[in-house]
């Protein structure tokens, strides 16, 4: 009897990482699909070393580009919602 009650928390502990995947959104963001891997892009095929000023500058620029892309997508979604609220009879 004691071994069964000791197995339940162990089973839950082992299943927890599998259930954690359910918390993610179903689709990757637009920036993730269009911009690709920042590390690979900023290393420029091995020409720029990680930690160099050029690499850091590139990563900062990519972060700004990603933020702008996500803000633009959010704005479009908000505008579509407002349009649908203001024009309920139009498809």
Image (tube, rainbow, N blue to C red):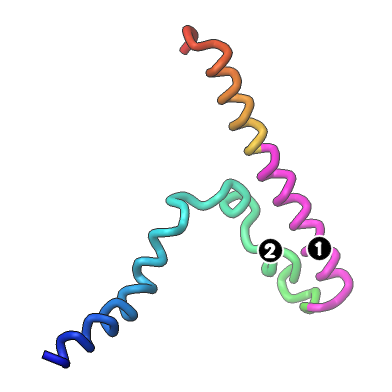
Q: How many marks?
A: 2
Verify whether residue 66 appears in magenta. yes
Using the numbered discs, state the Cα–Cα distance from disc 2 to disc 1 in whole angstroms: 9 Å
Residue 6 in the image, given as x and y percentages of width and height: 22, 88
Categorize mark 1 by other alpha carbons within 10 Å: few (<14), some (14-19), many (20+): some
Taking the magenta stretch, the answer to whether it contains residue 33 is no
Outermost residue toward the bottom?
2
Majority SS type along the magenta span: helix
Residue numbers of the magenta segment = 51-72
27 is higher (above) or lower (below) than 60? above
The image quarter containing residue 57 is bottom right
Local SS, label 2: helix
> Pointer 2 and pointer 1: residues touching (CB < 8 Å)?
yes
Q: Earlier in the sequence, mark 2 or mark 1?
A: 2
Residue 73 x/y as whole percent = 63, 38
Q: Which residue is mark 1?
A: 58
Residue at image position (74%, 71%) is 43
Q: Residue at x 15, y 86 (%)?
A: 4
Query: Does 55 sit left or right of 29 as displayed?
Result: right
Q: Position of residue 20 (x, y in %)?
A: 41, 66
List the residue tagged with mark 2: 38
Quarter assignment of residue 74: top right
Residue toward you, 66 or 45: 66
Question: Which quadrant does the N terminus fall into?
Answer: bottom left
In the displayed structure image, the side of residue 15 where residue 32 appears, left or right: right
Q: Position of residue 64 (x, y in %)?
A: 78, 53
Q: Residue at x 89, y 72 (%)?
A: 53
Q: Quadrant of residue 75?
A: top right
Q: Point out the residue furthest to the left here.
A: 1
């Amino acid at each position: 009897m004691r071994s069964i009650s000791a197995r339940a928390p162990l089973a839950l502990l082992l299943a927890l990482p599998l259930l954690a995947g359910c918390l993610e959104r179903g689709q990757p963001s637009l920036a993730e699909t269009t911009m690709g891997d920042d590390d690979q892009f900023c290393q420029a095929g091995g020409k720029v070393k990680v930690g160099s000023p050029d690499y850091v500058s590139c990563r900062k620029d990519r972060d700004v580009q990603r933020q702008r892309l996500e803000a633009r997508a959010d704005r479009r979604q908000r505008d579509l919602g407002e349009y649908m609220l203001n024009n309920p009879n139009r498809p």
